[in-house]
Image (cartoon, rainbow, N blue to C red):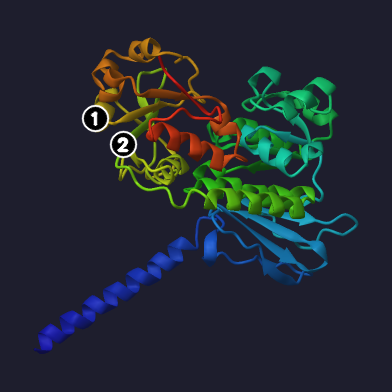
Amino acid sequence: MKKLCRRYITYIAVLVMAAVMLAVLSGCGGSSSSGSDAQAPEIDGLTYSSAMELKYAEQFNVFYYEDGYAVVDIKADGRYLIVPEGKAVPAGLDESITVLNGPVENIYDAATASVALFDAMDAMDSIRMVSVDKEGWTFDSVKVALDSGKVIYAGKYNAPDYETLMNEDCELAVESTMILHSPEVKEMLESLDIPVLIDYSSYESNPMGRTEWIKLYGVLTGHEEEAETFFNKQLEAITALEDVEATGKTVAYFYISTDGKAVVRSSTDYIPAMIKMAGGEYVFTDLTDDSGASSIDMSIEQFYKTAKDADIIIYNGSIDSSVASLEDLKAKNEIMSKFKAVKNGNCWCTGSAVYQRTDLAADMIMDIGKIIADEEPENGFITKLK
């Protein structure tokens, strides 16, 4: 009995030590936290007042301080102190916190999915430069701004026109996570004293979490009320989808990369969430990546094993626009002809708007729901391959 007790005590001690080590490790590495466990940074000279209420977003937090100061805390990126106009930067500020003078203007927005959110809260005047030329946009406000010269094209995200950025007094470069594949660009921007903020909205597990990033941009640009108003209207629209019943129909969402791999979405991504909200079932029920990435590569053979009997195929045309017909899809790989959805002609393709229109999540879900119900989508986000 004594030996058993000693073993039990030892076992408890090991568990306690493991918990302590886990807590220590989770506090290391320099990355900021997100969600309910996030804590506002202590800043000398500033008094913390409250945190922004977030309903769906998990990748960022906003902390408010007295006298109009705010800290934007992006989980995988960093912290940004928004200094209100006419106020001073606190002395002795931690070097890990990037200072932005609010309201932020002359933005170079290379995260195309965020531009619709600026437009939705009437803050397009904050954007001076974009990374996609006129032909690449799916909504008119950006095209009109480019035509008028209010917004100018300043090079792709991985090859920006640094001279233009400098001449236009760029105050902030907003980048998508694609910039992580071109770290030298981020380094160059920062060496030119242009702060870089990485938009991780694509890592949100709920489509409304992606839309809720409008609140972050509202803080940056001084359009918080407009951002809150718009988001609340979107909540009303999404509420109408809560009564959609599950149909049991399975959906495969993917594209085929230039090296022949199938690129699918993580099971925790916002696209599978949209499919579920529309009454469908994503074919990959438990597919994740250790890095937390939203997209996962696999061989076409691996993809076939799971997705061959999917009732519906949706090809991700926002990434690969080369598929405009069933024949185009079959030409990607001969194995595609063996898929149930291809044989039944139940194949669809998205356009760029699915990625760019973060402001219309409810409309996208409605279109997915239409094709699941064997009806014609009405909002133009998905077209049938014939």
The residue under the point 55% across, 38% down is 363
Q: Is residue 131 above or below residue 65?
A: above
Q: Which residue is mark 1?
A: 309
Q: Where, by quadrant of the figure, is residue 304 drawn?
A: top left
Residue appearing at x 27%, y 15% in the figure: 337
Packing grade of label 1 (10 A; few <14, some 14-19, many >=20) is some
Please report contact status of discs 2 and 1: CB closer than 8 Å, yes or no: yes
- Residue 76 percent location from the top left of the image: 54, 49
User: Which of these two is toward me, 133 or 138?
Assistant: 138
- In this rendered view, identify the residue nearer to me: 48 or 362: 362
Q: Position of residue 318 (x, y in %)?
A: 52, 26
Q: CA distance from mark 2 to mark 1?
A: 8 Å
| Residue sitting at x 59%, y 59% | 54
Q: Amino acid at mark 1?
A: Asp
Q: Quadrant of the C terminus?
A: top left
Q: Amino acid at mark 2?
A: Thr
Q: Is residue 333 left or right of residue 364?
A: left
The answer to which image quadrant residue 342 occupies is top left
Quick check: 331 above or below 76? Answer: above
Q: Residue at x 42, y 30 (%)?
A: 375
Residue 259, position in %: x, y?
Answer: 38, 18
Residue 331 is left or right of residue 50, and the answer is left
**Disc number for residue 66:** none
Which quadrant would residue 384 be assigned to in this image?
top left
- Left or right position of 58 against 267: right
The residue positioned farthest toward the front in the image shown: 375
Helix, strand or loop at mark 2:
strand
Of all residues, the one furthest to the right in this rendering is 86
- Which residue is label 2 attached to? 250
